[in-house]
Image (spheres, rainbow, N blue to C red):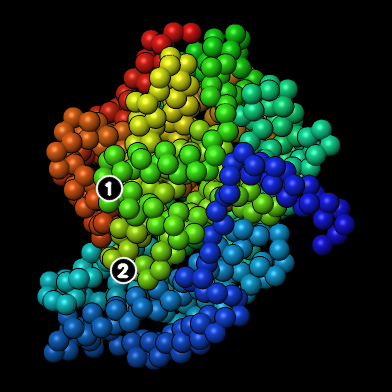
Amino acid sequence: MGFENFLNYSSQETASRQDNEELGALPEWQLDDLYEAQDSVELVSDLAWAEEQCESFHETYAGKLGDLLAGGDASQALYDAIAAYEQIDDRLGRIMAYAFLQYATQTSDQTGAKFYGDMQDKLTGLSTKLLFFTLDLNKLDERELAEAAKQEPLKHYKPWLDDLAQERPYQLDENVERLFLEKSVTGAGAWNRLFDETLSALKFDIDGDKLGLEQTLHLMTDEDGVKREQASEALALVFKDNLRLFTQVTNTLAKDKEISDRWRGFSDVAASRHLANRVEPEVVDALAQAVKAAYPRLSHRYYKLKAQFMGQDKLAHWDRNAPLPFADTRIIPWGDAERMVMEAYNGFAPEMAEIAGKFFKNNWIDAAMRTGKAPGAFAHPTVPSAHPYVLLNYQGRTRDVMTLAHELGHGVHQVLAGPQGALMAPTPLTLAETASVFGEMLTFRALLDQAETKDARRALLAGKIEDMLNTVVRQIAFYLFEREVHLARLEGELTSDQIGELWMKVQSESLGPAIELKPGYETFWAYVPHFIHAPFYVYAYAFGDCLVNSLYGVYDNAQEGFSDRYFDLLKAGGSKPYHELLAPFGLDAKDPEFWSIGLNMISGLIDQLEAEGT
């Protein structure tokens, strides 16, 4: 570590300790439930076990699944094979989760980065031994397999087999699939890692202080307009200095995706994501068009109202998330944030609070900001044989409390789905945001009910509206921007200016005339990690938010038995399609009117805010 880096690190650590005097003691997760150390006996043993089992599994089953299906007890034989595959999948997932979670809290540490990279290499190599299995299952006679899956014990895995069958039209020859898998480490995986490590290492000069990305973005919500502008300009300057690299990463990954899509036969740039989400393209199109049509009565109307609150005709882009004059800007200590969320969860269902409480009691949360820590927040499910972990960068604002409620919702969902096992616990993105957004809504409603003054109510309403606009309008705008970029990339490489122009066009349309996009904003596409890690993931946030708004409407109107149905939805994990899980609530996402229910809730909150007066 160079001396200059040491000074920056020390300065940020000092700032963090000062913040903690107000925030209280922030938790740091303990990963011992996965492994105690990189060189622990358990990890070394699991790697050896996985290597042996992958080799044995390949030798036992490769090219022989047809014989199992034709044998005397096909149901039992195939069940045994899938159960063995699932056990290996769980163990590999545990190792990779540990490597990633270590890396996420110290991306600038060379030892941690090397360990993460080495585990990716090792596990990718082992996975090539298993690659044949799902491919060969999809080659079996469909009618014979369906008949076997009706019988016990294979019936247990029928949802997984049905889900797997949807991949059949797009799977390639095993040798090609192996090549794609092995080269992912030096291809998309390497570009993803380069992006992450570059972003984590960036420093932004604010009055001589060298701040990381998360701290600088946080200043965009500061009550001091000068600081907001300084932060925006610092972001734009550093993004511009690194734009060549970010443009190269974007071009390369878009081309990489196009090659994969072309080989697999996907007809649209987002088709592979729709398949992964198990959602029909027309449903996503209906969502995107409904949100776009609602821009004027949602984002355009709200930002015009916000400008009036702030005594301006228009807001500069750095004022979009500025606190309003009546906003509650007090620092909320960590202990208070825990209490707020736990009370809201308990008010809905004690079982939800009991599960969420384990994250606090057992050190499953890492909340403190540190040099080199990944920005943002996430809940990582790890594997069903362990438990999830939550990462935050907690800074004590009301929005941070909502983020805590959001990520704990994910965590609760992941815990409840765990008994489905490694193959069926993962939830498609169409429902992955359900529990998280519902947890946010519960917390918001609880705080709104407790608000004692007009300003407190206005502050909460405005904060929730902004969060919903960021979740629905902004994420759909992100999705439409990604479509523009990937479609344009089909014609050749894009320059930074071309990407910036597409960004500005889509952002201007979505934010409306009350937001003035100042010079420098054309670079702000560069730091959005979803564009890099999971192309077209972003619409899942809007899907989840609108879906939860509809669910919450059912809860508000008929609470009797709702929590039981809700927990059944979460416990199902990925074992049922989304439309089947929504049916008990009387909801159908294929109905064109479905999306208007969720969008009307946002519009209704803006109505409430307007009624409170400016």
Q: In this view, does 573 lie above or below 562?
A: below
Give left or right: position of 183 versus 383. Answer: right
| Residue type pointed to by label 2 | Gly
- Badge 2 density bin: few <14, some 14–19, many ≥20, Cα 10 Å: some
The quadrant in which the N terminus is found is bottom right
Residue at the spot 43% in from the left edge and 16% down from the top edge: 453
Q: Can residue 489 be seen in this view?
A: no
Question: x%, y% of residue 556?
Answer: 22, 31
Which residue is at the front of the view, 155 or 211? Answer: 211
Q: In this view, does 403 lie above or below 42?
A: above
Residue at the spot 53% in from the left edge and 24% down from the top edge: 328
Camera-near label (2 vs 1) is 1
| In the image, farthest residue toward the right | 3
What kind of element bears circle 2? loop
Badge 2 is on which residue? 421
What kind of element bears circle 1? helix
Residue at the spot 33% in from the left edge and 43% down from the top edge: 345
State the image quarter where residue 90 is shown.
bottom left
Question: x%, y% of residue 164?
Answer: 30, 65
State the image quarter where residue 528 is shown.
top right
Badge 1 is on which residue? 350
Query: In the rendered structure, which disc, 2 or 1, sits on the residue that comes first in sequence?
Result: 1
